[in-house]
Amino acid sequence: MTMARRKAEATDLEAINAQRERLRQELAKLEAAAKAAELAAMDAGRTPLLTALDRVKIPAMDKGEAKLIARAISQHGAKAVANCLITLSMPA
């Protein structure tokens, strides 16, 4: 009887290890999906911004100014940058 019990434990261990591997693979898939979703969320504002830029006239600017504006939106968020721009539009 001891022999049968050891075999049952070994089978259980094999089942546990197989399940653990399936879970690891599922976790890897979830992590990849989460990373893709995070990247998509980080760039979610691009389309509305480009659409808005297509609808307004923009005077000449150099590459550095364009990067600075884009970096400010990326670092501080569109709302914070928009709030700063509102203060530029107010009469002194």
Image (cartoon, rainbow, N blue to C red):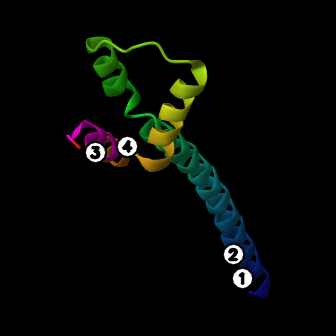
Residue at point 57%, 50% (across, down): 31
> How far, Cα to Cα, is label 3 from label 2?
74 Å
Magenta stretch prevailing secondary structure:
helix
Disc 4: CA contacts within 10 A as few (<14), some (14-19) or many (>=20): some
Q: Position of residue 84 (x, y in %)?
A: 34, 45
> How far, Cα to Cα, is label 1 from label 3?
77 Å
Q: Is residue 59 left or right of residue 23?
A: left
- Residue of label 4: 81
- Verify CB contact (< 8 Å) between mark 1 and mark 3: no
Indicate which disc residue 64 carries.
Answer: none
Judged by depth in the image, the label closer to the viewer, 4 or 2, is 4
- Residue of label 1: 5
- The front one of 91 and 50 is 91
> How far, Cα to Cα, is label 4 from label 2?
65 Å
- Residue of label 3: 87
Disc 1: CA contacts within 10 A as few (<14), some (14-19) or many (>=20): few
> How far, Cα to Cα, is label 4 from label 3?
10 Å
**Does the magenta portion include 88?**
yes
Q: Earlier in the sequence, mark 3 or mark 2?
A: 2
Q: Position of residue 48 (x, y in %)?
A: 31, 26
What secondary structure is marked by label 2?
helix
What secondary structure is marked by label 3?
helix
- Verify CB contact (< 8 Å) between mark 1 and mark 2: yes
Disc 2: CA contacts within 10 A as few (<14), some (14-19) or many (>=20): few
Magenta stretch, residue numbers: 84-91
- Verify CB contact (< 8 Å) between mark 4 and mark 3: no
Q: Given the image, on which type of amino acid does mark 4 rest?
A: Val
What secondary structure is marked by label 1?
helix
Judged by depth in the image, the label closer to the viewer, 4 or 3, is 3
> How far, Cα to Cα, is label 1 from label 2?
5 Å
